[in-house]
C-alpha cells in the first residue's frame, strides 16, 4: 500500500483503523505504521500533550530508535525556534509543514538538526501536520522520508489531505475522552466512566445509548434534546450539520471529512460548546463495541479554550464579544471560520481582534495565541521553548 497506489478500499480501511484509535489509543502504533507505509515513510511520530502537567496523553513513534529520540531532544531549541518562525504566518491548520518546501536551502545546509539527526539516516524530507492546539493541549503528526524515495510530492499531499481530517478527529476525540488507553470492557461501563457526554445513534439519529453525562444534558435540554427518540441540537444550524454527519457516517466514513468534527451547539452570545461525530460502521474495534450504532456523538463544554480566553479577558479587560472571538481562535479556527461560527461579519471579527491586540499589547495573532496559553509575557520578548505543533493561526 503506497501513496501513489492507494485504492478507495485501502483508504477506507486505513480510516477505519484511525477511528478505532479514538476509542483505543493503544492501537496507534499499528495504525501509525500503516500511515507511514502509505507514504513510503521511514519514520512517523504522533503526540498529544497535556500542557498543564507536561504529560503525554498519546505519544507513538515508528521507525525511530531511542537514541534518535534523544538526539532530536538535544536539538529541540533549534527545532522550536524554526517552527516558531514559520508558524507565525502559517496559512491554515490543514497545510503541512515540509522541510523540502518551507526551509531555505541555506538553512538546510547549515542546520545542526538536519545535518546531525536527519542526514546520517538518509532522511531527506519531513512532513508535519498540526492536529490540535488549545490552551491545554498540543498534538501533531510528523512523517520522515528516506532519500531513496525522494521528497514528498503533490500526490502525497493529496492523500494527506484525505487522511488528515480523520486523524484530527480521532485525536480530538481522544483528547475529549481524556484517557491514556481504554481497555476492552463492556460499552456501557466504558462510556459511563467518561466525563464528556456520549450518545450512540443509528442512521436516522435515533438515540441507541446515552451515558450518564448525556442523560443529564438531554434532561436539561439547553443544547441537545430527544425529539421522538431522535437526537436534535437546539440550534438549527447544529441540527442540520449533525444530521449530515450521521448520514455520512452511515454511508461511508471515509467521505465524512471535516463534517461533524466540531459542531457548535451554542448560540452566538454564549461560550461555545462543541459536538464531535465518530463513525462507528467500520473498524474491527468499534463494530465489536456497538454493532448497531452508525455514529458516536461526543458532546462537551471544553473548558480548555474558554478558560484561556477568560483568563486573558480578566487580565486585559476584554469585552464578552472579544472573549468569544479569542476563544474561537485559540480553538484553532481562522478568523473567517470564527466569524462563521459566531455568526458575525468577518469585518466585525477583525475589529474585535484589533481591539484585543491593542488591549493585550501584542501585534500578531500567533503571539496572541501563545499569550493565551501562558507561553509568553505581554511585556517582554518571548523566551519560551516552542513546541513542535505550535500555533496554527495566522495574523489576518
Image (cartoon, rainbow, N blue to C red):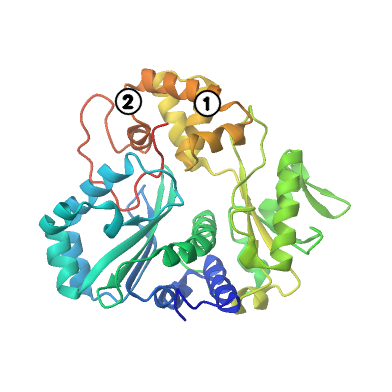
Q: Secondary structure at mark 2?
A: loop
Residue at image position (22%, 35%) is 382
Q: Is residue 331 above or below residue 184?
A: above
Residue closest to the eye, 174 or 92: 92
Q: CA distance from mark 2 to mark 1?
A: 16 Å
* Res 294 visible: no
- The answer to whether residue 205 is left or right of residue 6 is right
Q: Earlier in the sequence, mark 2 or mark 1?
A: 1
The x and y percentages for residue 104 are 21, 51
Q: Quadrant of residue 173?
A: bottom right
Residue at image position (53%, 63%) is 162
* Res 362 visible: yes
Q: Residues within 10 Å of mark 1 (few under 14, many from 20)?
A: many
For label 2, the residue is: 363
- The answer to whether residue 261 is left or right of residue 357 is right
Q: Is residue 142 above or below residue 333?
A: below
For label 1, the residue is: 349
Q: Residues within 10 Å of mark 2 (few under 14, many from 20)?
A: few
Q: Quadrant of residue 357?
A: top left
- The answer to whether residue 50 is left or right of residue 15 is left
Residue closest to the eye, 24 or 97: 97
Q: Secondary structure at mark 1?
A: helix
The x and y percentages for residue 320 are 54, 22
Res 47 label? none
Q: Is residue 56 above or below residue 64?
A: above
Label count reads 2
Amino acid at each position: 500500500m503506497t501513496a501513489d497506489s492507494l485504492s478507495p478500499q485501502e483508504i477506507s480501511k486505513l480510516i477505519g483503523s484511525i477511528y478505532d484509535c479514538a476509542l483505543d489509543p493503544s492501537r496507534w502504533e499499528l495504525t501509525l505504521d500503516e500511515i507511514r507505509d502509505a507514504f513510503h515513510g521511514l519514520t512517523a511520530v504522533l503526540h498529544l500533550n497535556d500542557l498543564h502537567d507536561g504529560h503525554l496523553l498519546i505519544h507513538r513513534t515508528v521507525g525511530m530508535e531511542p537514541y534518535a529520540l534523544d538526539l532530536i531532544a538535544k536539538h529541540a531549541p533549534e527545532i522550536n525556534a524554526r517552527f516558531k518562525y514559520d508558524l507565525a504566518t502559517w496559512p491554515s491548520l490543514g497545510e503541512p509543514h515540509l522541510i523540502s518546501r518551507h526551509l531555505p536551502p541555506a538553512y538546510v545546509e547549515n542546520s545542526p538538526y538536519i545535518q546531525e539527526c536527519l542526514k546520517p539516516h538518509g532522511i531527506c524530507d519531513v512532513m508535519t501536520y498540526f492536529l490540535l492546539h488549545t490552551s491545554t493541549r498540543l498534538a501533531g503528526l510528523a512523517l520522515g522520508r528516506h532519500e531513496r524515495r525522494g521528497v514528498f510530492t503533490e500526490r502525497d499531499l493529496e492523500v494527506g489531505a484525505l487522511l488528515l481530517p480523520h486523524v484530527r478527529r480521532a485525536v480530538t476525540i481522544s483528547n475529549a475522552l481524556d484517557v491514556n488507553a481504554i481497555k476492552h470492557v463492556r460499552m456501557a461501563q466504558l462510556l459511563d466512566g467518561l466525563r464528556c457526554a456520549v450518545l450512540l445513534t443509528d442512521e436516522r439519529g435515533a438515540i441507541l445509548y446515552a451515558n450518564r453525562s448525556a442523560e443529564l444534558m438531554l434532561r436539561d435540554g439547553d443544547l441537545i434534546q430527544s425529539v421522538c427518540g431522535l437526537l436534535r441540537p437546539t440550534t438549527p444550524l447544529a441540527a442540520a450539520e449533525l444530521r449530515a454527519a450521521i448520514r455520512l457516517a452511515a454511508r461511508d466514513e471515509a467521505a465524512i471529512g471535516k463534517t461533524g468534527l466540531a459542531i457548535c451547539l451554542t448560540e452566538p452570545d454564549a461560550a461555545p460548546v462543541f459536538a464531535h461525530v465518530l463513525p462507528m460502521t467500520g473498524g474491527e474495534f468499534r463494530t465489536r463495541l456497538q454493532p448497531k450504532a452508525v455514529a458516536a456523538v461526543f458532546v462537551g463544554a471544553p473548558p480548555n479554550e474558554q478558560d484561556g480566553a477568560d483568563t486573558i479577558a480578566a487580565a486585559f479587560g476584554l469585552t464578552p464579544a472579544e472573549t468569544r472571538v479569542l476563544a474561537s481562535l485559540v480553538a484553532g479556527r481562522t478568523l473567517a471560520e470564527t466569524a462563521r461560527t459566531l455568526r458575525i461579519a468577518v469585518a466585525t471579527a477583525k475589529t474585535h481582534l484589533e481591539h484585543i491586540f491593542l488591549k493585550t499589547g501584542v501585534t500578531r495573532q500567533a503571539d496572541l495565541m501563545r499569550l493565551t496559553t501562558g507561553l509568553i509575557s505581554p511585556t517582554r520578548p518571548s523566551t519560551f521553548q516552542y513546541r513542535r505543533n505550535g500555533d496554527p493561526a495566522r495574523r489576518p
